[in-house]
Amino acid sequence: MTAVALTADTFEQTVVDNDIVLVDFWASWCGPCRQFAPVFEAASAQHADVVFGKVDTEAEQSLAAAAQITSIPTLMAFRDGILVFSQPGALPAPALEQVITAVKDLDMDDVRRQIAEQEQGQQPDA
């Protein structure tokens, strides 16, 4: 499966509708982005159960701003609609494989429990 271009119109629905979504935030003028692109594409061919999306930060500036992208390339991973990984920098293939494996192996019940605990801790005291 090849990576799909994500836009402000398709980003949220893609993340919500799929179990695992990896997103590469990139730009055509970015050297490290161009180096990472074939690694990302190769991984997309090996993991048919994962949606690989790409966001062109030049064309989708509002989406990049909403995602708080300050450095490219930035890789984000979503599982069950929850952001579980975000890291700037071009990853070598073995490191990308580690991220994919880690995301697949996550105990999402535990992740949701941790998020709930964090949200409770941030509630102002009455």
Image: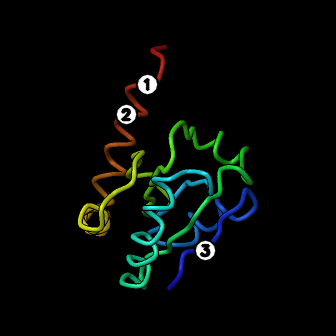
Three-letter code for the amino acid on which mark 2 is drawn: Gln
Q: Residue at x 61, y 68 (%)?
A: 14
Q: Residue furthest top?
A: 126
Q: Earlier in the sequence, mark 1 or mark 3?
A: 3
30 is higher (above) or lower (below) than 69 = below
Disc 1/disc 3 C-alpha distance (Å): 36 Å
Q: Picture coordinates of residue 72 (x, y %)?
A: 51, 46
Q: Residue at x 44, y 54 (%)?
A: 75
Q: Secondary structure at mark 3?
A: strand
Q: Picture coordinates of residue 64 (x, y %)?
A: 64, 45
Residue at mark 1: 122
Residue at mark 2: 118
Q: Secondary structure at mark 2?
A: helix
Q: Secondary structure at mark 1?
A: loop
Is the residue marked by circle 1 packed among few (<14), some (14-19), or many (20+) residues within 10 Å? few
Disc 3/disc 2 C-alpha distance (Å): 33 Å
Residue 78 numbered tag: none
11 is higher (above) or lower (below) than 68 = below
- Front tag of 1 and 3: 3
CB under 8 Å between callouts 3 and 2?
A: no
Q: Residue at x 41, y 82 (%)?
A: 49
- In front of the other: 84 or 108: 84
Q: Picture coordinates of residue 23 (x, y %)?
A: 51, 61
Three-letter code for the amino acid on which mark 3 is drawn: Val
Three-letter code for the amino acid on which mark 1 is drawn: Gln
Q: Residue at x 32, y 47 (%)?
A: 113
Q: Earlier in the sequence, mark 3 or mark 2?
A: 3
CB under 8 Å between callouts 2 and 1?
A: yes
Residue at mark 3: 4
- 49 with respect to 33 (left or right): left
